[in-house]
Image: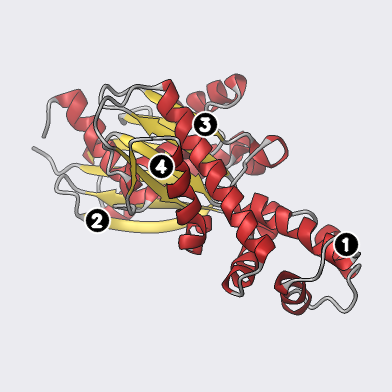
Amino acid sequence: MENLFFIGIDSGGTKTAITVIDKNQNEILSFQTGTGHYLQIGFNGLETLLQEITTKVLTQLNITEKNIGYIFAGIPGYGEIKEDQLKIDAITKKVWNNISFKVGNDMEAGWAGSLACEPGINIIAGTGAIGFGVNSQGLQSRSSGWGPICGDEGSAYWVGKKALEVFTKEADGRYEKTPIYEIFKKELNLKDDFDLIHLIHNQYSLDRGKIAKLSLLVYKAALENDKYALKIFKEAGEEIGLMIKAIINKIDFGNEIIKVSYTGGVFQSGDFIFEPLKNYLKNYGLNAEIIKPKYSAVMGSAIYGLKLYNEKNGGL
């Protein structure tokens, strides 16, 4: 049997990660390139990106398409707008005409990595927020992921935006001043409180990735026991708990303890986010256990590709 390789692609709003493994899950090749979000680079840009990724893998490993057993690609926004999904399907069929593959939303890549393709729930709380679960029968469900305007509660962007609200209220006297006020003034180099408007609108250009990074300042304030920062993280934990609860209500996980893992920068806040989340799960009697991610999303994508190949061909 020819040597077979399995490609995992995890694309996000800023970058695309690629990992290639062999049948024993050994990492053979890994690299990064630009975003694969079609709303940013267009459908033509997405086609070019996927073609360049494929060409680079074939060239670097000195193989042909026959040596690629399977590809799993997590593409941001996939499956959310039917018309756009059909266009992405046409692009991937064109680029990977002679290769077996599956395209999914990038939330599937997060699940595949954090839970190693096993039943359970993965929560992404990075710039955006979304939950994705799979039970032992293979039934899938998602919650949240409505974007920055309609939702994404519990995300780093949501945390940053909540903090901006606190700062402005403290600045004009609606709230008493707490550590978060001075932290924002110092870290953002605000000579005057109203410089915040120029920063957000002109320097940041309302960029949600930059606003999401303000969550790091909320973490600093929480370390100083700032009551508003602690409240923001408590609410974020509860929003994430609500996502988990919604998924559990939609698909049956049986009587087994449900494994819940996580991806994204919000979870770097440690106990500030995990404690309210665990309390939420306990208070609602949810039979769930928080576990550390097993793999990165891109490694999970490659493992998922191997799994799908085995399911299709009865193993290697």
Please say if the residues under marks 4 and 3 sit with CB atoms less than 8 Å apart: no
The tag earlier along the polypeptide, 2 or 3, is 2
Please say if the residues under marks 1 and 2 sit with CB atoms less than 8 Å apart: no
Q: How far separated are the C-alphas under marks 1 and 2?
A: 46 Å
Mark 3 falls on what kind of element? strand
Give percent across and percent down for residue 201. Answer: 85, 58
Give percent across and percent down for residue 9. Answer: 40, 45
**Looking at the image, which is closer to me, 53 or 79?**
79
Residue ID for mark 1 = 197
Q: How far separated are the C-alphas under marks 1 and 3?
A: 33 Å
Residue at 34% in and 47% down: 114
The tag earlier along the polypeptide, 1 or 3, is 3
The tag earlier along the polypeptide, 1 or 2, is 2
Amino acid type at circle 3 is Ser
Residue ID for mark 4 = 282
Amino acid type at circle 4 is Lys
Marker disc for residue 34? none
Give percent across and percent down for residue 263. Answer: 44, 51
Q: Which image quadrant is residue 95 in?
A: top left
Please say if the residues under marks 1 and 3 sit with CB atoms less than 8 Å apart: no
Judge depth for marks 2 and 4 and give the one in front.
4
Q: How far separated are the C-alphas under marks 4 and 3?
A: 20 Å
Q: How far separated are the C-alphas under marks 2 and 4?
A: 38 Å
